[in-house]
Image (spheres, helix red, strand yellow):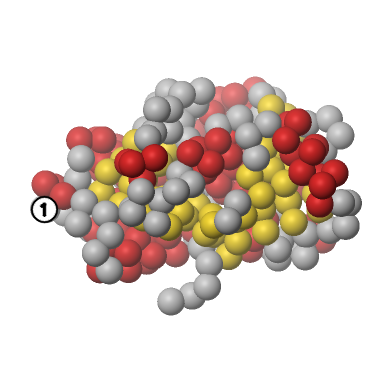
Amino acid sequence: MTIQVVFTPAGLAKDEVAGRGVFVIDVLRATTTMCAALHHGARSIIPVASIEEAIRMGQTLGPDDLLLTGERHGKPIPGFALGNSPLEMTEAQVRGKTLVMTTTNGTGALLSAAGAAHVYVAAAANLSAAAARARQLMADGLDLVVVCAGRHGAFGLDDAYTAGRLVVETIGDRRRLDDLDDAAVAAVDLVRRYGVRWERPLGRSAAARQLDAIGMADDVVEAAKQDRYPVLPVFAERRVQVAPLG
Ligand code: MLT
């Protein structure tokens, strides 16, 4: 079985994910925030590409138990109930709610993976759960693709390092490198370079520096906590929900 990493979903073709198990990473912050929301009891999350689509979806589904969430330039979207901070996804805010979410890179990355055999959400916050499912999929004979959201169609250090951590956690710091494509080897090399502490690779990323500049450095600290929100979100039929165990 093979593991492929893509550092940005730009240009990701349907046939690259078809029949494969896909893990989508936007550690700062969309996939961390999804884990936080589902861990705290959100019923589901509907990722959409644009603010307009989120508003339309909100009108179609009606206001009951529905929250519009997301960010542009890292900041909450005017008129939306919540932004894109994992710290906002408290039980009081999200329990029993459906979130319609749009973010700059993360929700688009998730939508680009639609059509895969299985699509999961991964971050530091659920690394062990994601890796356990990745091992199970490989044992079932599936090839894996780890899709990094990146930044505006380009490489993001935070996501690439997290991809490396997911690969290492899935297959060990390993010898069978021929099962990995070059991007996966490079991601594993980032883990060798930075080690197992999340703070440095996440903190050095452009995404973290942007969050720092707008007063959201606490979100970077939160996103760097491994297994903080130990759920396995699965994306199927347009919704992200907690995957059944097994
Ligand atoms: C993204 O989708 O790129 C992130 O949500 C950005 C952010 O959290 O500000």
Q: In this view, does 138 lie above or below 113?
A: below
Residue at image coords 47%, 55%: 120
Q: Which residue is drawn at 78% across and 59% down?
A: 97
The residue located at (73%, 51%) in the rendering is 99
Asked if residue 186 shows in the view, the reply is: yes
How would you rate the neighbour count of disc 1 (Cα within 10 Å): few for under 14, some for 14-19, many for 20 or more?
A: few
Q: Nearer the viewer, residue 98 or 84?
A: 98
Q: In which quarter of the image is residue 233?
A: bottom right
Q: Position of residue 119 (x, y in %)?
A: 46, 54
- Number of marks in the rendered image: 1
User: Quick check: 41 left or right of 15?
Assistant: right
Q: Where is residue 114 in the image (x, y as percent from the top left)?
A: 48, 46
Using the image, determine if residue 195 lies above or below residue 39.
above
Q: Name the residue beneath numbered marker 1.
A: 175
Residue at horizontal 54 percent and vertical 55 percent from the top: 235
Using residue 155 as the reference point, say whether residue 39 is left or right of it.
right
Q: Classify mark 1: helix, strand or loop.
A: loop
Q: In which quarter of the image is the C terminus?
A: bottom left
Residue type, mark 1 in image: Arg
Quadrant where the N terminus sits is: bottom left
Quadrant housing residue 136: bottom left
* Front-most of residues 159 and 181: 181
Label 1 C-beta lies within 8 Å of the nearest ligand 1 atom: no
Q: Which of 208 and 180 is in front in this view?
A: 180
| Residue sitting farthest toward the bottom | 246
